[in-house]
C-alpha cells in the first residue's frame, strides 16, 4: 500500500456523510488501490454535531474552528463540504494556506447548489 492520505472535513451534513462513506468504500471498489485515505478531523458549526460525526465515523479529532484543520500540517486533504453560503471563505483559506505552504499539487472544488443537479 502506498501513501495514506489524512483528510480533514469541513461540514458534515448530507454531503459530508456522503464523502465519508465514499472514502471508507474506496478499498472495496478499487482493489489494489495504490493509496489509502482516512478522515482524521471533522469541523462543524456546533461542537455536539462535530463530536457525533467523529464518534460515528471513528474520526480522532473534532472542532468548530475550520482553521484548526486548514492550518494542520499533518492534514493532506481538506474536504470542504460546507453549504454554498459558507463555502467561499474556507476555499479561499485553503488556497492561500495549504497551496502556498504545503505545495499541494491537486485541488478539486465542486460547488453544489440546489440548482445544480
Image (tube, grey):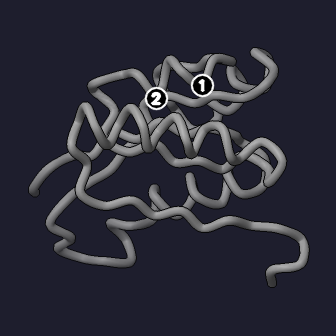
Residue 115 falls in which quadrant of the image?
A: bottom right
Q: Is 117 left, or right, of 97 in this rendering?
A: right
Above or below, 84 against 70 in this view is: below
Above or below, 21 against 70 in this view is: below
Using the image as rendered, state which of residue 97 and residue 68 is in the foreground: 97
Q: Mark number for residue 32? A: none
Q: Whole-percent x and y of residue 86?
A: 77, 42
Above or below, 62 against 10 in this view is: above
Q: Residues within 10 Å of mark 1 (few under 14, many from 20)?
A: many
User: What residue is at 68 percent from the left and 20 percent from the top?
Assistant: 51
Q: Is 83 left, or right, of 10 in this rendering?
A: right
Secondary structure of the residue carrying numbered label 1:
helix
Q: Whole-percent x and y of residue 17?
A: 67, 52
Residues tagged 2 and 1 counted as in contact (Cβ below 8 A): yes
User: What residue is at 60 percent from the left and 38 percent from the top?
Assistant: 90
* Quadrant where the C terminus is found in the figure: bottom right
Residue 12 falls in which quadrant of the image?
A: top right
Q: Residue farthest to the left?
A: 2
Q: Residue farthest to the right?
A: 114
Q: Real-space Cα distance between discs 2 and 1?
A: 6 Å
* Quadrant where the N terminus is found in the figure: bottom left
Secondary structure of the residue carrying numbered label 2:
helix
Q: Whole-percent x and y of residue 92?
A: 55, 42
| Residue topped by disc 1 | 66
User: What residue is at 19 percent from the left and 59 percent from the top?
Assistant: 35
Q: Is 76 left, or right, of 70 in this rendering?
A: left
Q: Residue farthest to the bottom?
A: 117
Using the image as rendered, state which of residue 73 and residue 53 is in the foreground: 73
| Residue topped by disc 2 | 70
Q: Whole-percent x and y of residue 108?
A: 45, 64
Q: Residues within 10 Å of mark 2 (few under 14, many from 20)?
A: many
Amino acid at each position: 500500500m502506498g501513501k495514506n492520505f489524512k483528510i480533514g472535513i469541513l461540514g458534515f451534513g448530507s454531503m459530508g456523510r456522503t464523502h465519508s462513506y465514499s472514502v471508507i468504500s474506496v478499498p472495496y471498489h478499487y482493489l489494489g488501490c495504490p493509496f489509502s485515505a482516512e478522515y482524521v478531523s471533522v469541523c462543524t458549526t456546533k461542537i455536539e454535531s462535530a463530536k457525533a460525526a467523529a464518534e460515528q465515523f471513528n474520526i480522532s479529532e473534532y472542532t468548530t474552528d475550520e482553521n484548526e484543520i486548514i492550518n494542520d500540517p499533518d492534514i493532506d486533504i481538506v474536504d470542504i463540504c460546507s453549504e454554498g453560503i459558507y463555502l467561499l471563505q474556507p476555499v479561499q483559506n485553503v488556497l492561500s494556506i495549504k497551496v502556498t505552504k504545503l505545495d499541494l499539487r491537486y485541488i478539486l472544488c465542486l460547488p453544489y447548489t440546489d440548482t445544480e443537479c
